[in-house]
Amino acid sequence: MTFQLASDIGGTFTDLFVCDEEGVTNSYKSPTTHGDLPDGLLTAIEKAAVDHGLSLEEFLQRTDRFVHGTTVSTNAIIEGETDTTGLIVTEGFKDVLWLRDGGKEDPYDWDRDYPDPFVPRALTVGVDERINAEGECVTPLDEAEARSAVERLADRDDVEAIAVSLLWAHVEPRHERRIGEIIEDVAPKIPYSLSHEVNPVIREYRRTSSTAINASLTRIASSYLADLERRLNDRGFEEELLVITANGGVLDPSEVRETPIWTVDSGPTMLPVAAAEMTEAELGRTDAIAVDMGGTSIDIGVVDDGVIPRTRDATVGDDYLLGIEKIDVTSVGAGGGSIAWVDEGRFLHVGPQSAGSVPGPACYQRGGTDPTVTDAALVLGYLNEEYFLGGTMDVDRSAAREAIRDEVAEPLDVDVGSAAHAIYAGAMQESVNGIEELTIERGIDPRNYVLFGGGGTFGLFAVGIAREMQANSVFLPREAGVVSSVGGILSDVRRDFTASQFGRSDQFDFDNVNDVLTTLRSDAEAFLDRMNVADSNRSRTGFVSARYPEQIWELEVELPVERITSENLDALVEQFHEKHKDVYGFRMEQDVEFLDWRIEAVGKVDAGKGVVSGGEPTSDPVTPHAQRNAYFDGGTVECAVYRASALRHSDVITGPAILEAENTTVVLPPESELSVTTGGNYRITP
């Protein structure tokens, strides 16, 4: 028996999803060990090994695919633990990270301070050189000045990495390459990043921000991956580790070490990947709103007609722009560990502070005294004190009641039950607000979408959220508690190759554009060769960013052909017109400008793609495991409690009821109905 593993390290728990060669799946959770992230992961793997009657070494020896999602890069940025980075730019452009894109993201937020740049001006050095927009050398690189700039940065005790971002280097990179050679000569032990390699697109702020972040993460990510590989290999794992990236795919560690920025905020991108695969396979639906509600936050993504939207506007930490084109996932600071608190005006808040895994919610009995969403769910009867995490973790309902009484009920002058429900309702509203921001505010009608979700906490709120959003169908994977890890198993090998080449439809430079596309496709093929992807599993899809003249931002459209000719250019222009109409509601009969060209290289992975059997259908009604009092419709109601392990394909449960799985709990209010699909997953009619 062989296994495939996918892991996702969250703020509270480390998730592990296991799929064996027969398609049977299991999931495991272990508290995240923030001081030593691999330790918590190995604990989860050991749980899986014991569950399969194997030692840790035997289990890893039988593992032929391991997909890993890590928060090490994200945490380093948020916590200010990245390597201190020096920045080399074109003389006269030292303020590129200060000036940003110009303007203020929210001009009506008077309390918002102007953010500091990722690299302070004191560590930014200009060098005399200039390439113009056409790639012509206007001012040759002053190599003596460049060498002096590198020496100034390298001689500082606090500089641990160097980023190089010169004006128009994405069009002609020879000056950047030369500075890279000088860094290797002057300071061979200092990691560095060149903007034309990290993010070769127009707009110097985005390109510079990406490059600076990438340089600051190079040593951290490399050390983490080397340590993880060593520890896995020492325990019997012999195959190649695959790392989840922010574009919704996976790469091997050697590719990630070059551009570790792709691991920032990468775990949540597996959420819409899982939603796209599973809703189409099980329901035949290609539109989904994906929600992962864990212990620390809620991640929200969208699948629109089978396509997962991307964004170049993602930020992390203190409003640092990533600049790369990643899967569009929004995070809201509300989860099972979100702390409930009452302000001086006796107004209840839920989050954004989180109790995390240590000390955790009050009910964990690890020293935490603040009431959380998990404590509220326990008091309301939704969670089972004796079956938390499948009975592997002790929680104390009386400790939860005490925390809610002291911090919420007494300040609000209400009873503990009412206070617990207020916390629960507040967390639900935070979830709804976050979903509305990503859907309704962008013209997406939730009534036409499946609400797909998971995470250890989502099942508690799924039906309530669906009713608020007027979504008529909810879908939860059987292993909903580790939904992003499920996406990891389903993900393909994927990498983007991008280059800038300006073109305009009325004076299109066919030769140069096609030369760029040929180079990008060659790079994509070389990548797929390195990843040992079979020819039959390869795909290369082209895209271009386009706009009307004098517009500020672009829209990306898929290229209908591999080469652009005078015969098919009109079709590409028409495609942009229609995309503009879909997004903005109108089109203009104008010429179109083309800026960035991208080839998406994908190596299809068959692993985990099949729908897992939900067992033989049965005509016998499913029997409750127990009865329990829980809060519904303004009061306590006795409801049936079912165990997920006892359910089979075609089983139906009607609310009020509670479904308990080892890694999640699903609350079914009155008039809702859950049915088990052919794949053993859960479809709910709210």
Image (cartoon, rainbow, N blue to C red):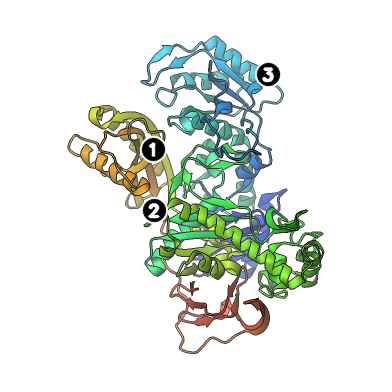
In the picture of the structure, the residue carrying the numbered disc 3 is 155
Question: Which of the two discs, 1 and 3, sits closer to the camera?
Answer: 1
The answer to whether 218 appears left or right of 487 in the picture is: right
Q: Residue at x 70, y 49 (%)?
A: 36
Q: Residues within 10 Å of mark 2 (few under 14, many from 20)?
A: few
Q: Amino acid at mark 3?
A: Asp
Q: Amino acid at mark 1?
A: Glu
Residue located farthest toward the front when viewing the structure as drawn: 345
Q: Amino acid at mark 2?
A: Val
Residue located farthest toward the left when viewing the structure as drawn: 567
Q: Residue at x 41, y 47 (%)?
A: 532
Nearer-the-camera pick, 66 or 591: 591
- The CA distance from mark 3 to mark 2 is 49 Å
The answer to whether 230 appears left or right of 419 in the picture is: left
Q: Earlier in the sequence, mark 3 or mark 2?
A: 3
- The CA distance from mark 1 to mark 2 is 18 Å
Q: Earlier in the sequence, mark 1 or mark 2?
A: 2
Q: Which mark is residue 680?
A: none
Q: Is residue 275 visible?
A: yes
Q: Which mark is residue 307?
A: 2
Q: Residues within 10 Å of mark 1 (few under 14, many from 20)?
A: some
Nearer-the-camera pick, 632 or 296: 632
- The CA distance from mark 1 to mark 3 is 42 Å
Q: Secondary structure at mark 1?
A: loop
Q: Secondary structure at mark 2?
A: loop
Q: Residue at x 42, y 53 (%)?
A: 443
Question: Which of the two discs, 3 and 2, sits closer to the camera?
Answer: 2
In the picture of the structure, the residue carrying the numbered disc 1 is 554
